[in-house]
């Protein structure tokens, strides 16, 4: 049925004759294995007057060959084998196969590997010509596998030709797929087509079922005819061979033919293929349609490409099921032909046929837009969406936008991404939190703070439930970029949103950043705002402020801060007094001593003693000597008696009066 429908040609019997192959040894030229010339020495060509070996001499050479293989002495083994062949003699079967297997070992690298493989090929070919029964099938398979690893297409094909010529028939499944792989890696399956035809001939003429190429091989031959050679005659010959051998086609077989028929514009043949697929009971035509699209793209018949896409939706129902490779191929064809409008039209028409329950990433629109992005045509993808809107294409699913947004993220084109988000929101669609988080992270990485803020506002306005991730991303990014003023403005904007978890740490980060940059007034205002909104300052809050005031020599501000925290400490319950720790005591004492506020300094000392916090007096002695070394008590007594008393108390405590 397959044969009769696909071709009208009569059955062709395989000819038993084959053209005379060139000399075996012509295949040993170095170019088959390497770009560098390698001299193969010696030739295994039989001498004109071969010397006859005695049994003792033959046994001696065989012993040397065996011993050399055991010790992995390749050169010595090769010499022993040469000596035997020079006398038109061959070693015993076990030694022959051991030698070729040893030479086929390509674990070594470099020029030596090519040389060993050439010797393996020469040995196998010589044995096949002289006495093929000595060569085991498994040895041939091992040699072929080594040739595959070495990408030695020429020698592999030459060995198969030698096998055929000398009627040495190795089961196809031991070497056929290896030849396919070798030819494919070499860039063309055309050489395999000749092997395929000869294997088919042998299988039929010699009635050797084990020489019959299987479905994989048949499809490789079809691929060569349809995809590479684009030859209708050769493709029909392969189909005829499959029919003769009883090889049942699969969807790949139909796919290759569909490509060729589409490429040649043979619509009637394509209709026959579809009817045949029904006859064979194939449920899916995805591969058939994908190959048709490839053929029509190759012939620049873009209208037919559109027809195939829409036809596939009508036939298969919910989704087209094309792969990414197919979408990339058709998108490239349309864009190269400057047919963006046509792509938009295809998506619009496809949406009318697609099921409403289709997954976003299974739609034609997603496939086309995603392919544009993968090919580096993000702007074209956006243009397609704009063209769809201009054509009145109705609603575009959110999934169609996602690939473009992800591409913009990857390319850090955050301004364009933000603009696209605005368009999405205005159309009534809503992005999920993962996309928002990715866009905001890309914006912060790109230091595009305006886009990050805009996107976050969009998240809030569209009622996205989880704002925590993006909030932390923005705060962390602003902190790393030393932009405390933006942190403060952002925090003030979101502080009352219940979806955002603002805590004292966030305020501390802003205060610390302001202090670090010397913007002490901004730090103070932020601190006041923090307290006003009932966020509890902690040790880190005070440490940042003290260190900032100290750097700016704003000692009076430290005094005010101490008076504030002193009142809180006094009113705290006993279990909460531990908040005044060693670091805070040290910071207060050092700043107050530097500022000359000895009364407050002694208050800190008293609190530290009360709370059993260790204080290193030496540090404050040094601070006093650096700042107040010339301070005289008589003058101070006349101006401020109370301050004098505090100074004396401090000096006594610090041991400065001894």
Image (cartoon, rainbow, N blue to C red):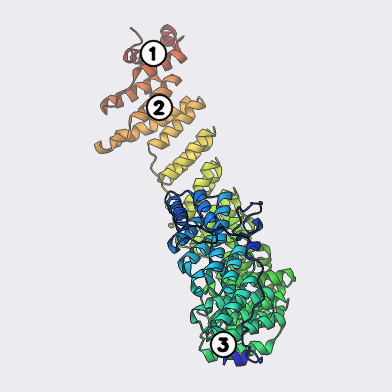
Element on which disc 3 rests: helix
The one nearer the camera, 611 or 358, is: 358
| For residue 408, side relative to residue 504 (left or right) | right
Q: Position of residue 325 (x, y in %)?
A: 60, 70
| Residue at x 48%, y 38% (from the top left corner) | 511
> Number of labelled discs?
3
| Distance of label 1 from label 3 (alpha carbons) | 116 Å
The one nearer the camera, 102 or 612, is: 102
Residue labelled with disc 2: 587
Q: Quadrant of residue 632?
A: top left
Of labels 3 and 2, earlier in sequence is 3
Element on which disc 2 rests: helix
Residue labelled with disc 3: 243
- Marks 3 and 2: which is nearer the front? 3
Q: Position of residue 332 (x, y in %)?
A: 68, 69
Of labels 2 and 1, earlier in sequence is 2
Vertical arrangement, residue 465 with respect to residue 506, above or below: below
Q: Position of residue 451 (x, y in %)?
A: 60, 54
Of labels 1 and 3, earlier in sequence is 3
Q: Quadrant of residue 371?
A: bottom right
Residues at discs 2 and 1 in contact (Cβ within 8 Å): no
Residue labelled with disc 1: 644
């Amino acid at each position: 049925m397959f044969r009769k429908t696909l071709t009208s040609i009569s059955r062709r019997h395989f000819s038993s004759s084959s053209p005379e192959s060139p000399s075996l040894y012509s295949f040993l030229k170095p170019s088959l294995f390497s770009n560098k010339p390698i001299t193969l020495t010696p030739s295994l060509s039989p001498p004109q007057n071969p010397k006859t070996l005695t049994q003792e001499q033959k046994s001696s050479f065989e012993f040397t060959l065996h011993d050399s293989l055991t010790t992995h002495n390749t050169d010595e083994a090769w010499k022993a084998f040469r000596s035997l062949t020079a006398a038109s003699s061959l070693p015993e079967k076990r030694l022959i196969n051991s030698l070729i297997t040893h030479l086929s070992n390509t674990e070594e690298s470099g020029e030596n590997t090519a040389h060993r493989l050439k010797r393996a090929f020469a040995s196998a070919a010589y044995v096949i010509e002289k006495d093929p029964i000595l060569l085991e099938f498994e040895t041939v398979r091992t040699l072929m596998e080594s040739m595959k690893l070495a990408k030695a297409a020429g020698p592999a094909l030459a060995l198969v030709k030698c096998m055929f010529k000398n009627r040495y028939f190795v089961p196809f499944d031991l070497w056929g797929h290896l030849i396919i792989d070798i030819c494919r890696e070499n860039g063309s399956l055309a050489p395999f087509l000749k092997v395929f035809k000869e294997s088919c001939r042998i299988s039929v003429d010699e009635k050797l079922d084990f020489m019959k190429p299987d479905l994989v091989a048949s499809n490789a031959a079809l691929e060569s005819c349809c995809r590479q050679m684009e030859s209708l005659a050769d493709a029909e010959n392969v189909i005829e061979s499959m029919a003769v051998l009883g090889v049942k086609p699969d969807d790949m077989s139909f796919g290759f033919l569909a490509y060729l028929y589409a490429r040649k514009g043979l619509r009637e043949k394509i209709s026959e293929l579809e009817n045949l697929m029904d006859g064979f009971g194939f449920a899916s035509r995805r591969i058939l349609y994908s190959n048709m699209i490839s053929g029509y793209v190759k012939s620049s018949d873009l209208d037919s490409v559109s027809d195939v896409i829409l036809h596939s939706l009508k036939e298969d129902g919910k989704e087209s099921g094309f792969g990414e490779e197919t979408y990339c191929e058709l998108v490239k064809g349309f864009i190269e032909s400057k047919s963006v409008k046509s792509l938009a039209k295809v998506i619009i028409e496809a949406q009318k046929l697609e099921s409403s329950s289709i997954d976003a990433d299974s739609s034609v629109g997603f496939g086309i837009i995603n392919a544009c992005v993968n090919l580096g045509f993000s702007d074209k993808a956006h243009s397609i969406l704009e063209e769809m809107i201009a054509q009145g294409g109705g609603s575009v699913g959110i999934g169609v936008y996602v690939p473009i947004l992800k591409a913009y993220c990857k390319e850090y084109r955050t301004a364009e991404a933000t603009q696209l988000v605005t368009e999405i929101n205005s159309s009534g669609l809503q992005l999920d939190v993962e996309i928002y988080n990715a866009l905001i992270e890309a914006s912060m990485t790109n230091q595009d703070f305006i886009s990050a803020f805009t996107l976050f506002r969009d998240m809030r306005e569209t009622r996205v439930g989880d704002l925590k991730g993006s909030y932390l991303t923005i705060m962390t990014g602003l902190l790393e970029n030393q932009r405390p003023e933006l942190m403060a403005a952002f925090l003030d904007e979101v502080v009352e949103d219940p979806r955002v978890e603002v805590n004292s740490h966030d305020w501390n980060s802003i205060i610390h950043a302001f202090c670090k940059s010397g913007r002490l007034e901004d730090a103070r205002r932020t601190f006041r705002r923090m307290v006003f909104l009932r966020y509890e300052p902690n040790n880190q809050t005070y440490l940042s402020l003290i260190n900032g005031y100290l750097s700016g020599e704003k000692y009076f501000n430290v005094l005010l801060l101490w008076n504030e925290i002193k009142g809180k400490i006094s009113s705290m319950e006993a279990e909460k007094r531990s908040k005044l720790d060693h670091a805070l005591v040290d910071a207060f004492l050092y700043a107050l001593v530097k500022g000359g506020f000895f009364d407050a300094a002694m208050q800190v000392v008293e609190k530290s003693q009360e709370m059993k916090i260790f204080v290193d007096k030496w540090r404050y002695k040094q601070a006093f000597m650096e700042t107040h070394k010339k301070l005289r008590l008589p003058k101070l007594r006349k101006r401020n008696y109370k301050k004098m008393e505090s100074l004396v108390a401090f000096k006594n405590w610090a041991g400065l009066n001894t």
